[in-house]
Image: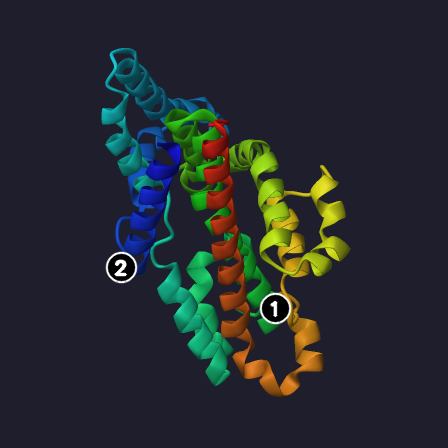
Amino acid sequence: MILVVFLIAYLVRRRLDSLNAISSDALWRRWFRRGSKVKAGSESGISVGLFLVALPAILAAVCVYILSMYGWRITAYPLEIFVLVLMMGMPGWRQSVESYADAWQRGDMQAAWHHIQKRLPAAERGAAASPEVMHLSLSRALMMAAFERFFLVAFWYVVGGIGVAIFVRGLVALSEQWPQAAARPRYLKACEWVSWIPARLLALTFGIAGDLSGWLAEARQAIAETTKNTSEVLMIAANGSLTGYALDPARFSRVHLDEWAGFGGRSLNAVRDLLNRSMLVWICALALMVIAGVV
């Protein structure tokens, strides 16, 4: 049933994303308001935030355990679907990317930046950034958003159940939305720990879903290195798996200068297609594990 539950939740979530509906970020933001007041000098503390994400995770796990103990495990599946739908998703991204690609096609880089500036990390929102830097920042943000809101949740749901998936997704929300900015780097470090295995598994999947020869040439060492963070590993692996310099705008502009106007939309479509194919690989792998009785 794990495969069926995740597949239903994934399809529903993709449909909601296309309609730009139901953002889990807003729910986390309201929940984290309970940590908006702290004592002076304790702004970097993380215990309150960890408690706030551990509480719903434990409640969900206990609920599933009790239902299973009394032979009502099947009644927990609708709850898991509902929770997965809430935790996953990237509402608004499709509209932002399409507007960005249209502005890039027109050559209006200022308008392109305005369409996607809220999607970029705060440190990378400089309006004076070159088109190449802006595009790589957006590609990295898109890949990280898909990883954290789909692949990371999927991995920990299969490995640890709905409770662990909620806790891990909560860590991501803490690193992005915790009211005390001083504590966010510590939450981000925790996210790196829980992302280490699934990020490298996704990077490996890029080689299967993309250009394997290019991936072998560039990505193998990045996966094995422990010092590289999640975004670096994914970007290196994706760059090796994509053809046509999709994640190398500087080289593309030198080789295909006459096609530069269409690069923005083409590159992002290539990234999204790679992510979609990678999710299909994960679903197929999960189906094989279910058939083999592993999960």
Alpha-carbon span between mark 1 and mark 2:
27 Å
Q: Which residue is drawn at 30% across and 44% down?
A: 26
Q: Do the residues labelled 1 and 2 touch (CB within 8 Å)?
A: no
Hey, which quadrant is residue 263 in on the image? bottom right
Q: Residue at x 64, y 53 (%)?
A: 207
Is residue 108 among what the camera can see?
A: no
Q: Please tell me how crowded label 2 is: few (under 14), some (14-19), or many (20+) other residues with Cα within 10 Å.
A: few
Q: Which residue is drawn at 50% across and 33% down?
A: 289
Residue underneath mark 1: 246
Left or right: residue 280 compared with residue 66: right
Q: Quarter holding the N terminus? A: top left
The image's colouring method is rainbow
Q: In the orientation shown, which residue stands out farthest toward the front? A: 291
Residue underneath mark 2: 19
Query: Which kind of residue does numbered mark 1 sit on?
Result: Ala
Q: Residue at x 43, y 66 (%)?
A: 97
Nearest the camera: 118 or 58? 58
Query: Which kind of residue does numbered mark 2 sit on?
Result: Leu
Give residue 188's position: percent from left, percent from top: 54, 37
- Under tag 2, what secondary structure? loop
Left or right: residue 53 compared with residue 197: left
Nearest the camera: 184 or 42? 184
